[in-house]
C-alpha cells in the first residue's frame, strides 16, 4: 500500500513536470514578452493577426473543422497532423494575446481590439469538405499568413514583437511543408 502512494505521488510530479514543459514551449527563445510596455502603434499593427477574418483564431477553427472531417473520413493520419497544426496556431494566438494585453490592448475577439467593432465571426471559416480542396485552402491560408506577418514585421520597431512574429512565420512555413506533403499524398491516392 505504501508503494502505491509513492507511485501516485511520482505520477503527480510527472504530470506537473509535463505541464511545465508544455508551458515552456510557449516561450520564444531569447524573448521575454513580460518586458513589453504600452505601445498602441505596435498593437494596431499586430491586432488583425489575432482575431480578424484571416487570423490565428480563424486558422484554429479551420484546422479543427478539417480535423473532424478527416477523422470522419477515417484518415486519422491526416487528422492528427491537422490537430497538431491547430494546437500550434493556438500557441500563436496565445503569444499575440499576451503581447496585445501588455501593449495596452484588451485582446477581445475583434479585428482591432479593444474596439468593440468587427467582432470575429465563424462564417469566415472555409467549410470545404473535399479533402484536396481542404488542404489547398489550408495552404493558401498559411501563405497569406506568412505574407501578412512579413508585412507586419516590416512596419514594426519593437524588437520583441518582431522576434515573436519571425518565429510565427518560421512555424507557418513548416505548416506549408506539412500541408504540401499531405496534398501530394492525397493527389497521389486519386
Image (cartoon, rainbow, N blue to C red):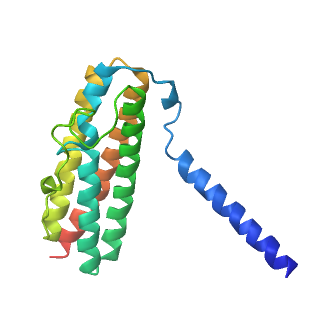
* Residue, far top: 157
Where residue 55 appears, as percent x and y from the top left, is 24, 44
Q: Is residue 48 left or right of residue 1?
A: left
Q: Residue 125 sits in which quadrant?
A: bottom left
Between 181 and 24, the one lying in front of the other is 24
* Residue, far right: 2
User: Which residue is drawn at the image coordinates 31% and 27% (left, top)?
Assistant: 43
Which quadrant of the rendered structure holds the C terminus? Answer: bottom left
Between 70 and 105, the one lying in front of the other is 105
Where residue 170 appears, as percent x and y from the top left, is 36, 40
Where residue 95 appears, as percent x and y from the top left, is 41, 39
Q: Is residue 98 left or right of residue 1?
A: left
Is residue 31 visible from the viewing direction of this image? no
* Residue, far front: 116
Q: Is residue 139 left or right of residue 101?
A: left
Where residue 82 appears, as percent x and y from the top left, is 32, 63
User: Which residue is drawn at the image coordinates 22% and 32% (left, top)?
Assistant: 115
Q: Note whether 6 is above or below 117 in the view shown.
A: below
Q: Note whether 77 is above or below 150 in the view shown.
A: below
User: Which residue is drawn at the image coordinates 31% and 52% (left, top)?
Assistant: 175
Is residue 182 visible from the viewing direction of this image? yes
Amino acid at each position: 500500500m505504501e508503494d502505491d502512494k509513492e507511485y501516485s505521488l511520482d505520477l503527480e510530479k510527472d504530470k506537473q513536470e509535463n505541464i511545465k514543459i508544455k508551458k515552456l514551449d510557449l516561450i520564444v527563445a531569447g524573448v521575454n514578452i513580460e518586458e513589453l510596455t504600452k505601445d498602441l502603434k505596435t498593437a494596431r499593427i499586430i491586432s488583425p493577426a489575432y482575431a480578424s477574418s484571416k487570423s490565428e483564431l480563424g486558422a484554429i477553427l479551420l484546422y479543427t473543422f478539417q480535423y473532424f472531417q478527416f477523422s470522419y473520413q477515417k484518415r486519422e493520419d491526416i487528422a492528427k497532423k491537422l490537430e497538431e497544426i491547430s494546437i500550434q496556431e493556438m500557441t500563436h494566438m496565445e503569444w499575440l494575446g499576451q503581447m496585445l494585453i501588455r501593449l495596452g490592448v484588451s485582446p477581445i475577439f475583434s479585428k482591432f481590439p479593444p474596439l468593440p467593432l468587427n467582432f470575429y465571426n465563424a462564417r469566415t471559416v472555409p467549410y470545404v469538405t473535399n479533402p484536396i480542396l481542404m488542404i489547398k485552402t489550408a495552404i493558401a491560408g498559411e501563405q497569406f499568413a506568412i505574407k501578412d506577418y512579413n508585412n507586419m514585421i516590416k512596419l514594426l520597431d519593437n524588437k520583441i514583437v518582431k522576434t515573436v512574429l519571425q518565429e510565427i512565420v518560421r512555424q507557418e512555413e513548416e505548416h506549408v511543408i506539412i500541408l504540401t506533403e499531405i496534398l501530394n499524398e492525397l493527389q497521389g491516392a486519386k
